[in-house]
Each structure stands twice: as structure tokens, then as C-alpha cells.
Image (tube, rainbow, N blue to C red):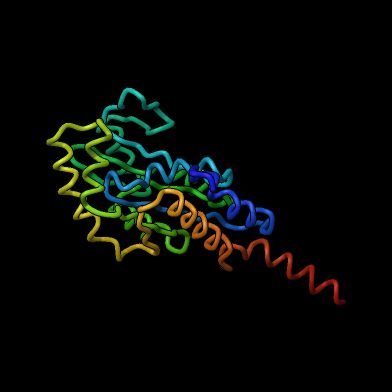
Amino acid sequence: MSNDPSAAMLPVLAAVEAFDTLPRRGLLFILSSPSGAGKTTLSRHLLAADDALNLSVSATTRPARPSERDGVDYHFVTAEVFGEMVDTGAMLEHARVFDNQYGSPRAPVERALAAGRDVLFDVDWQGAQQIKLAMQGDVVSVFILPPSIEALERRLKTRAQDDDATVARRMAKAMDEISHWREYDYVLVNDDLSKCATQLAAILTAERLRLHRRNPGLDGFVSGLEAERT
């Protein structure tokens, strides 16, 4: 069995792609977790395995890290520009995390849904709640739990991106994040990356097949079946 989570997802995603070729409405697929629990890694593998899934690129007021690219990892904007987007309703959701603002631009998300494409969100519980309120019926939310608090702290320390004070602050915030797990549609424990990735792909597959998302294509398909009998 491959250790690559992307490879683990492929059989599930390929099966539904071969079966479900009818037009449908897209969905918003939200992943949340405390920092260090693995949602970013899982997101990357899911995107690599699934061409029908687009990542919602957030806007943020924090400075870019050396490896990050504007418009790819985030839209890096000033506080003034961010505030303008919020005031004009151009943000689907927004929140302050530590000393910076994060938000999801609305227009590209609405275009993707109408075109039958799915959008992946890597957001915290605050963002998830705002998206659910704004886009009722289009949202599927998944919370990723770490196997233990000890494992979570170890992951944060070995990332080598933050100093000890920042790690301590993130650990304190992690417990608040975890307390919101009941607000999600699905909860997965990331104790094995490949297993968790496969479960995630199965959720996405099932949600794509829900009747209310497939109505645009099924109406015509069933009409065709009925016409064959006349």
C-alpha cells in the first residue's frame, strides 16, 4: 500500500468521477483544525488528487513568509484594503487571528459553485461558522483532531517556523479550537495520514452525490429516461 496520501485518495475519487458525469452544483468543503493537526498537509494531498477541487485563496494582512507567493498561498493586502473588502461585502468570511486579519474573497467562490466546481477552505472555526451562515446548503465541514495534545505540541515544535513563545500561544489557542468540534458535519482523528486522507476523500465523494447538488443534471437525465418509454 502506498504511503502517499494522494495515491490513497485516487481510487475513491476516480470511481465517483467515472460514475457521476451529470452537471451539478458545486460545494464548499471546509477543513478546520488546531494549528499543527495536519489540515494543510491533507488539503495539499486532496488538491493534488482531485482536479475538480479548487483552493480558496485567502486574503491576509500578515507579512508573507519567505516561501510564500502572493496570489497562490495568500493574497497579501494592507489593513486598509482588507477593511475596504469587508465594508463592501467582498469577503465571504473574515476573522482576526492573533495580530492579523484573514478572510475569503466572495466572488471567485460564487463563480465556482455556479460552474459546478468545488472549493476547499482551510479556515478556523470562526470562518467556518461565517461561511455556513452565508452559504447555507452549499457547505460541508470537517474538523481534524490530533491523536493527542502531546503529538500536537511536538508537531508545532518540529516545524521550526515559530519561537517557543509563539508555540505556547498556539497551544493555548488549540484547546479553544478543539472545543468547537461538535459544530462540524464530520470529525476525523489524524493518527495516520493516509487513513485520514482516504476518509476525507470518501466524505467529499458522498457529499458530491447528494440529491440537491445533482438536481440540475438529474432533471434532464430522468426526463430522458421517461421519454424512452413513450
In this rendering, would 188 be left or right of 55?
left
Q: Tell me where residue 176 appears, x and y as whole percent.
A: 19, 55
Identify which residue, 106 or 15, lies in the foreground: 15
On-image quarter of the C terminus: bottom right
Identify which residue, 23 or 1, lies in the foreground: 1
Q: Is residue 32 above or below residue 63?
A: below
Toward the left, the furthest residue is: 165
Q: Is residue 214 above or below residue 110?
A: below
Q: Tell me where residue 52 appears, x and y as whole percent.
A: 58, 46
Q: Tell me where residue 24 appears, x and y as whole percent.
A: 61, 58
In this rendering, would 159 be left or right of 169?
right
Q: Is residue 125 above or below residue 158?
A: below
Identify which residue, 169 or 194, lies in the foreground: 194
How many numbered marks, from 0 up? 0
User: Residue at the spot x=19%, y=54% of the render?
Assistant: 175
User: Residue at the spot x=56%, y=66% of the render?
Assistant: 210
In this rendering, would 185 be left or right of 222?
left
